[in-house]
């Protein structure tokens, strides 16, 4: 990707964000490089673009936000990407994490339920030069069966329980990260599949928006 003058204007801020993430415990060099190579200002409205490289969530319209960079970095570091993975992302949102994933994995399939968000994300993902990404408008709690199984499933919203279709679409040996709990209190859960068995490990408290859909929250 050839960076525009506007992009170069944010280069120093992007590098400072990477150093901030490093100082907060992100040590995976591939994750840090993905942040260094991904222009977050493309994924937020122009009115808040000057804050794009702060470690804070920002509004992206339709009542949604782009997550704090540290949350994305923590998620991605937990996965321990090798580079060959096929990934399912539930909740495209701004598309920022989608592009980070595209730099860490072989293929990324991402599902978003809000049409205007998906179209904005599609444009930003293209502008960022991510070519190994496929997008779908739909209910993320159903996953994306056509391309299953997935080595990694990342869920960017909290569910009262783990949607069965996502478990079914996880590859043998695959890992899923999903916040599980009530609307007010959740824990990040890692699920690892071994044959027909699923091992759940609680990784600590998190706070996410609710996962809406047939196999999540209904309203």
Image (tube, helix red, strand yellow):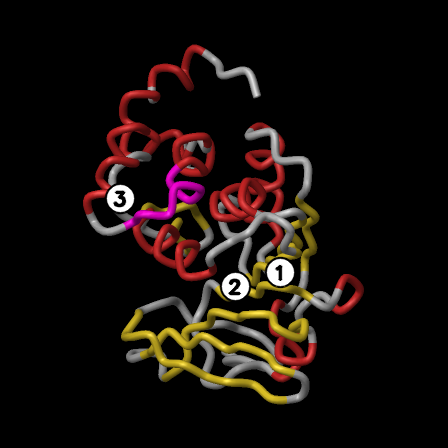
Q: Dot 1, how many residues are within 10 Å of its Cα: few (below 14), some (14-19), or many (20+)? A: many
Looking at the rendered structure, the number of numbered marks drawn on it comes to: 3
From the viewer's perspective, is the residue at label 3 or at label 1 nearer? 3
In-front residue for pair 43/1: 1
Residue located 53% across and 70% down the image: 176
In-front residue for pair 132/27: 27
Image position, residue 9 (x, y; %): 34, 15
What mark, if any, has residue 21 been given in the picture? 3
Residue that label 1 marks: 88
Q: Dot 2, how many residues are within 10 Å of its Cα: few (below 14), some (14-19), or many (20+)? A: many
Of the image marks 3 and 1, the number of the one nearer the N terminus = 3
Residue at the far bottom in the pictured view: 197
Establish if 96 lies above or below 173.
above
Question: Could you tell me which quadrant the N terminus lies in?
Answer: top right
CB within 8 Å, label 2 to label 3: no
CB within 8 Å, label 1 to label 2: yes
Q: Secondary structure at mark 3?
A: helix
Residue located 58% across and 63% down the image: 152
In-front residue for pair 22/97: 22
Of the image marks 2 and 3, the number of the one nearer the N terminus = 3
Q: Which residues are magenta?
A: 26-32
Residue located 62% across and 32% down the image: 126
In the image, is 89 to the left or to the right of 196?
left
In the image, is 169 to the left or to the right of 185?
right
Image position, residue 57 (x, y; %): 30, 49
Image position, residue 88 (x, y; %): 62, 60
**Separation (CA) of disc 1 from disc 2:** 6 Å
**Separation (CA) of disc 3 from disc 1:** 24 Å
Residue that label 2 marks: 154
């Amino acid at each position: 990707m050839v960076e525009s003058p506007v992009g170069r204007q944010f280069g120093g801020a992007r590098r400072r964000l990477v150093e901030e993430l490093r100082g907060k415990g992100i040590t995976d060099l591939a994750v840090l490089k993905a942040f260094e190579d991904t222009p977050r200002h493309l994924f937020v409205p122009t009115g808040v673009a000057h804050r794009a490289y702060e470690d804070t969530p920002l509004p992206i319209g339709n009542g949604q936000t782009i997550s704090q960079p540290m949350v994305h970095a923590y998620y991605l570091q937990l996965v321990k990407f090798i580079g060959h993975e096929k990934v399912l992302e539930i909740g495209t949102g701004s598309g920022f994490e989608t592009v980070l994933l595209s730099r860490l994995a072989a293929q990324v399939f991402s599902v978003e339920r809000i049409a205007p968000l998906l179209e904005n994300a599609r444009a930003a993902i293209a502008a960022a030069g991510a070519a190994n990404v496929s997008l779908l408008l739909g209910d993320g709690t159903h996953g994306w069966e056509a391309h299953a199984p997935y080595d990694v499933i990342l869920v960017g919203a909290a569910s009262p329980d783990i949607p069965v279709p996502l478990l079914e679409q996880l590859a043998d040996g695959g890992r899923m990260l999903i916040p599980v709990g009530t609307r007010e209190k959740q824990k990040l859960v890692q699920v690892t599949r071994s044959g027909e068995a699923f091992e759940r490990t609680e990784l600590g408290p998190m706070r996410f928006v609710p996962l809406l859909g047939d196999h999540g929250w209904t309203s």
